[in-house]
Amino acid sequence: MKNWKRAAAAAMIMTLTAAGCGSGAGTKKEKETALDPEKPVTITVWNYYTGAQQTAFDGLVEEFNQSRGKDLGITVKASNEGGITDLEENVLAAAEKKVGAKEVPNIFAAYTDTAYNVDKMGIVADLSEYFTEKEKEEYIDSYITEGSFPDGESLKILPVAKATEVFMLNKTDWDKFASATGAELSDLETIEGLTETAEKYYEWTDSLTEEPDDGKAFFGRDAMANYMIIGAMQLGTQIIEGDGTGKVKINFPEEIARKLWDNYYIPFINGHFSAAGRFRSDDIKTGNIISFVGSSSGATFFPDKVILNDDESYSIETEILPAPQFKEGEGYAVQQGAGMVVTKGSEAEIEASVEFLKWFTDTKQNTYFSAASGYLPVKKVANDAEAMQKETDGNETVGKVIEVSIETVNNNHLYTTPAYDNGTTARNVLEYSMSDKAAEDRQAIEADIAAGTPRGDAIAKYDTDENFKAWYQSTKEKLEQTVK
């Protein structure tokens, strides 16, 4: 790591020396810089990274301060603001100048909805004039497009690390199931195949117990909104359709909603799917499920053992596969991961922020950060599985996730919802409307079974067209309210 850091530092200095040449018309690069090593500037960066992600980010901040930052008179101070929700709340509190809030940072990590809301307050810097067209073209196109709101020409979010979704499997327990039933990994390529496999797993595990109707769940899902949004895209419908100016319309046809319902709600109330812990990796760890779809950036949190109780545990092997897609659907995958937003300040502060972000997203630094944290690099040239594998320090799970994630990015249309005023509200509707109902109804079913109702009768009470239509109408109305 030290070797590439020295090489990177040297390359940065050479780049700085040549900065004024051929940068492209109309950019800040053509003008006299406001940076002066004799007048150092300190910039603050708020992030939400944890664990290996935090360690890697802090290490690179220190490296920047000792290399390019030192040459330019820039010091970066990074601050972890808790989880992404805490970070968003702190940014909004600072922007609104609430009592007790901190000063607005020079840079903060944000998803599109938060960046959009802060931008409306007039404090977000447009970075488009600090990047040449050639520089912007180095980034994956859809990553730049995501941050180019509201007119498609501005650049309000710079991508720094991205993620998609992958299917993570406890292969140790899968092998036992597959050996006994003939199940194959290829069965998990489609959402329909996953639903069928989960039913078979429940029946097989039920057959191993002395108690009737005591099978185990096979699958769980993080980020239900992704399932709804990307699933609909695969089936030909954009639930939240934007026009590029912040205006959107809702498309939520009943037949699409029914397909989503049949492949999550129905298996959930039957006990084939489950969600008990805060995250599905927690459910893997407790043995509640043996597979889930989640963010590729969560690779470092996948457990290496199942802990049944204080006295019983066993090691597990991990298998990483592409996230299943609808059988007849088009190839769409989610694009996620917060980018970095620069706030307005002095010219020196904005330039310093841009210099740090350009350095951080340069291939060597970004590849290292991504490999250490389970994220994906944001530049086209850096999305190379072989190069990424070299930076994983032998972490087999992270290596597998990176390989599958890059395959997903290269072989699918990447999609994220457009930014608009009530985007967070709409996403919350999609996140919780079906998952909360499934959990509540499953709990009621279990209570009925415990009271003596036959399992089939207890489930049949909820597996009805009327139940679906009531949920569908309620969800559609809530979504439509977000655009009124």
Image (cartoon, grey):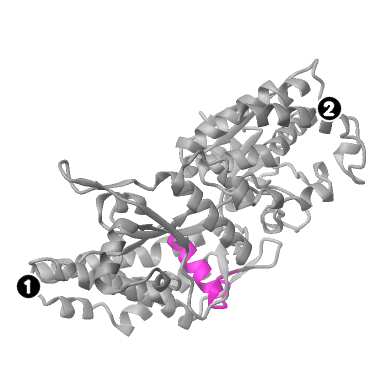
| Residue indicated by mark 2 | 34
| In the foreground, 361 or 30 | 361
> In the picture, which quadrant includes the N terminus?
top right
Question: What segment is highlighted magenta in the picture?
Answer: 223-240
Which residue lies at the image location 82% right of the left edge and 21% below the top edge? 36
Determine whether the residue tagged by mark 2 lies in a helix, strand or loop. Answer: loop
Residue 57 position, x and y percent, is 57, 34
Residue, far front: 179
**Residue 330 seen in the figure:** yes
The answer to the question of whether label 1 and label 2 lie on touching residues, with beta carbons closer than 8 A, is no
Question: Identity of the amino acid at label 1?
Answer: Gly
Q: Is residue 406 left or right of residue 401?
A: right
Residue 301 position, x and y percent, is 40, 45
Q: Is residue 447 left or right of residue 391?
A: left
| In the foreground, 422 or 255 | 255
Question: Identity of the amino acid at label 2?
Answer: Ala
Asked whether 195 falls inside the magenta stretch, the response is no
Which residue lies at the image location 46% right of the left edge and 66% below the top edge? 227
> In the picture, which quadrant includes the C terminus?
bottom right
| Residue indicated by mark 1 | 452
